[in-house]
Image (cartoon, rainbow, N blue to C red):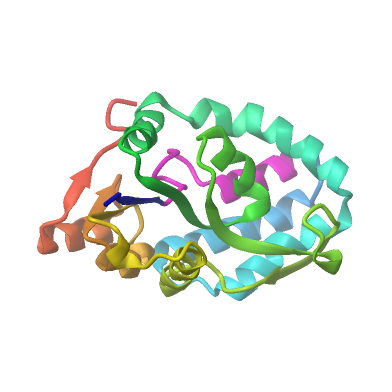
């Protein structure tokens, strides 16, 4: 029987927040108004850290800018974003963690609340084939179509991560009981629902709330970037 290995992304596999960095990148390129966007970007990020984020409002704000540009232009910008903001933050310790589970033959998946436009190429950079992320709607449902600026589907946030993982497993003809062990690595107290669902929760670079919860529950605590 194989194992299941789930990974949060931001501040877990990378020591930064990819969506927050994408916002800063857009400001830097002048794609959005610097003052207003930076203010909103910082506000939503602060709400996420505080556990008070309205996920629908956040997604509509984050995705609305995508509808103003062609996919070709967005892809070009994202490639630059990967080179400048993400690749330098994909560190050996995180790569090795993912590869360890892959070498073990575990079924691996990145599960993030950040949208799939931002995170798709990052999952590819980690050689993880399956990504569960908040979904950005495209025109006529075409995967390569223009973005509408709206979210679709169930957001992979808090309890929504459990729902989305279970739907994915069902599509494979599997359930939680199909695995000898299930791991989830996350830094955020927002992920406590999914951490409590797996057999082996790992508080990874945890925020203060998750660290306290993990200690109380006797969970493993992993400081993946302690030497960086």
**Does the rendering let one see residue 29?**
no
Q: Quadrant of the C terminus?
A: top left
Is 69 left, or right, of 57 in this rendering? right
Q: Nearer the viewer, residue 89 or 104?
A: 104
Q: Quadrant of residue 49?
A: bottom left
Looking at the image, residue 223 lies above or below residue 96:
below
x and y percentages locating residue 116 in the rendered image: 63, 54
Q: Residue at x 78, y 40 (%)?
A: 75
Is 103 left, or right, of 52 in this rendering? left
Q: Nearer the viewer, residue 72 or 61?
A: 72
Magenta span contains residue 174: no
Q: Quadrant of residue 114?
A: bottom right
Q: Residue at x 52, y 66 (%)?
A: 171
Is 69 left, or right, of 5 in this rendering? right
**Does the rendering let one see residue 163?**
yes
x and y percentages locating residue 169 in the rendered image: 45, 64
Magenta span contains residue 17: yes
Which portion, as a residue range, is magenta?
8-28
x and y percentages locating residue 217 in the rendered image: 13, 63
Q: Residue at x 28, y 66 (%)?
A: 177
Q: Nearer the viewer, residue 1 or 184?
A: 1
């Amino acid at each position: 029987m194989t194992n299941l290995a789930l990974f949060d992304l931001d501040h877990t596999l990378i020591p930064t927040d990819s969506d927050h960095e994408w916002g800063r990148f857009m400001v830097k390129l002048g794609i959005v108004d610097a003052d207003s966007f930076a203010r909103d970007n910082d506000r939503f990020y602060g709400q996420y850290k505080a556990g008070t984020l309205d996920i629908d409002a956040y997604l509509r704000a984050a995705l609305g800018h995508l509808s103003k540009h062609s996919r070709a232009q967005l892809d070009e910008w994202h490639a630059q974003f990967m080179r400048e903001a993400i690749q330098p933050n994909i560190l050996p310790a995180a790569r090795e963690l993912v590869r360890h589970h892959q070498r073990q033959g575990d079924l691996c998946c990145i599960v993030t609340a950040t949208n799939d436009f931002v995170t798709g190429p990052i999952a590819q950079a980690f050689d993880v084939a399956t990504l569960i992320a908040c979904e950005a709607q495209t025109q006529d449902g075409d995967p390569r179509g223009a973005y509408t600026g709206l979210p679709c589907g169930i957001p992979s946030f808090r309890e929504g991560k459990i729902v989305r993982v279970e739907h994915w497993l069902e599509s494979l003809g599997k359930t939680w009981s199909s695995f000898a062990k299930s791991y989830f690595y996350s830094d955020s107290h927002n992920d406590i629902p999914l951490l409590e669902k797996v057999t082996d929760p790992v508080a990874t670079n945890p925020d203060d709330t998750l660290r306290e919860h993990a200690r109380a529950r006797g969970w493993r605590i992993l400081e993946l970037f302690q030497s960086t």
